[in-house]
Image (cartoon, helix red, strand yellow):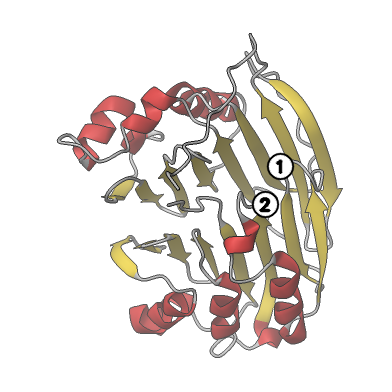
């Protein structure tokens, strides 16, 4: 058995004057979620955001934009097409559809190119790959219409691969497999202080968290598989000064991954190169997009200290 933790992601913003996306209510957004072959598990609200924890990741709905992530074998592109039934494409200010390379792409119900072509029939756009085709990378589609995001608009993604076995065990079923136990071991509910938190523990393994404060959010999803263990973290929190390094240090100290991808969406800024203790950079791609964001993708890895033993397959008796 294998669960694909790597996610598909869409962010959509609407033109000024369009009705609040929150005004469509849970029922309308639940139809979007069902189209992706997910379901809503719980919800969290404040004066700016409706945050839904899904059976496969998360949905955040604000007045003028929404963000949805799904993992596993979900069909997020069908959810995007469902959004177009109540958000006319001509009222979309910008749309970004992102898909991480999968461990087992042949098990997916579609691929990035099929998804992008289906979305482009409704909303013309351009597609890019960040990273080498045969290594860690993301594929990204964005709508063609020019867009000028606010100068302080930032999105940070930290996608961690091959997490430490001791960290993974915290998220695997057992007598202490509760959200409270996970927080006591990791402090994961307080990555940033003062946020309202909604989290869920999956059986037999796995964990998801949504957190909101004013306009800000962060979300964490843990897939502690023995093959392809994976953790994703994302936030729109404005990280100035050393805050980005502090966030990285906190997450890397919890999960101790063998490698990770660092992805930044920023307003026309060239991000500084980060020197991360113990990790070495392997790839960097920076691209200014017509949708207004300068996107940077970096892949870091932990150097191997000694030769490993070969992995032995367990053969069934004939």
Secondary structure state at the residue bearing disc 2: loop
- Dot 2: within a 10 Å radius of its alpha carbon, few (fewer than 14), some, or many (20 or more) residues? some
- Mark drawn on residue 101: 2
Q: Is residue 272 above or below residue 294?
A: above
Task: Using residue 73 as the reference point, say whether residue 175 is left or right of it.
Answer: left
Q: Confirm whether residue 65 shows in the render.
A: yes
On the image, numbered disc 1 is attached to which residue?
A: 136
Residue 28 on image: x %, y %: 41, 84
Residue shown at the point (40%, 33%) measured from the top left: 191
Residue 20 on image: x %, y %: 48, 78
- Dot 1: within a 10 Å radius of its alpha carbon, few (fewer than 14), some, or many (20 or more) residues? many
Residue shown at the point (35%, 46%) measured from the top left: 206
Residue at the extreme front: 318
Q: Is residue 64 above or below residue 273?
A: below
Q: Is residue 112 above or below residue 36?
A: above
Going from the N terminus, do you reach mark 2 or mark 1 first?
2
Mark 2 and mark 1: Cα distance apart in space:
7 Å
Secondary structure state at the residue bearing disc 1: loop
**Closest to the observer: 185 or 161?**
161
Q: Is residue 277 above or below residue 130?
A: above
**Closest to the observer: 3 or 300?**
3
Q: Confirm whether residue 273 shows in the render.
A: no
Residue 37 on image: x %, y %: 44, 74
- Mark drawn on residue 293: none
- Do the CB atoms of the residues marked 2 and 1 lie less than 8 Å apart? yes
Residue at the extreme top: 306
Q: Quadrant of residue 89?
A: bottom right
């Amino acid at each position: 058995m294998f669960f694909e933790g790597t996610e598909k992601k869409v962010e959509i913003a609407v033109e000024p004057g369009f009705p609040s996306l929150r005004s469509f209510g849970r029922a309308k957004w639940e139809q979007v979620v069902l189209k992706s072959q997910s379901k809503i598990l719980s919800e969290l609200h404040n004066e700016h955001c409706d945050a839904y924890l899904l059976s496969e990741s998360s949905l955040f709905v604000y007045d003028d934009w929404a963000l949805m992530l799904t993992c596993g074998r979900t069909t997020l592109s069908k959810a995007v097409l469902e959004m177009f039934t109540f958000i006319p494409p001509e009222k979309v200010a910008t749309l970004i559809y992102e898909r991480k390379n999968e461990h087992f792409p042949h098990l997916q119900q579609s691929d990035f190119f099929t998804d992008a072509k289906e979305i482009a029939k409704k909303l013309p756009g351009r597609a890019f790959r960040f990273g080498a085709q045969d290594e860690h990378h993301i594929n990204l589609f964005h709508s063609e219409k020019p867009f000028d995001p606010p100068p302080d608009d930032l999105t940070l993604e930290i996608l961690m691969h091959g997490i430490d076995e001791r960290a993974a065990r915290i998220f695997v079923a057992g007598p202490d497999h509760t959200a409270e136990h996970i927080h006591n071991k990791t402090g994961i509910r307080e990555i940033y202080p003062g946020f309202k938190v909604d989290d869920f523990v999956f059986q037999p393994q796995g964990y998801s968290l949504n957190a909101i404060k004013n306009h800000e959010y962060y979300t964490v999803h843990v897939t502690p598989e023995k093959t392809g263990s994976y953790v994703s973290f994302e936030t729109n929190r404005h990280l100035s000064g050393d805050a980005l390094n502090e966030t990285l240090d906190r997450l890397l100290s919890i999960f101790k991954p063998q490698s990770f991808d660092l992805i930044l969406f920023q307003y026309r800024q060239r991000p500084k190169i980060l020197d991360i203790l113990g990790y070495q950079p392997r790839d960097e791609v920076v691209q200014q997009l017509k949708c207004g964001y300068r996107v940077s993708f970096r892949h870091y890895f932990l150097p191997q200290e000694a030769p490993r033993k070969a992995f032995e397959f367990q053969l069934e008796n004939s």
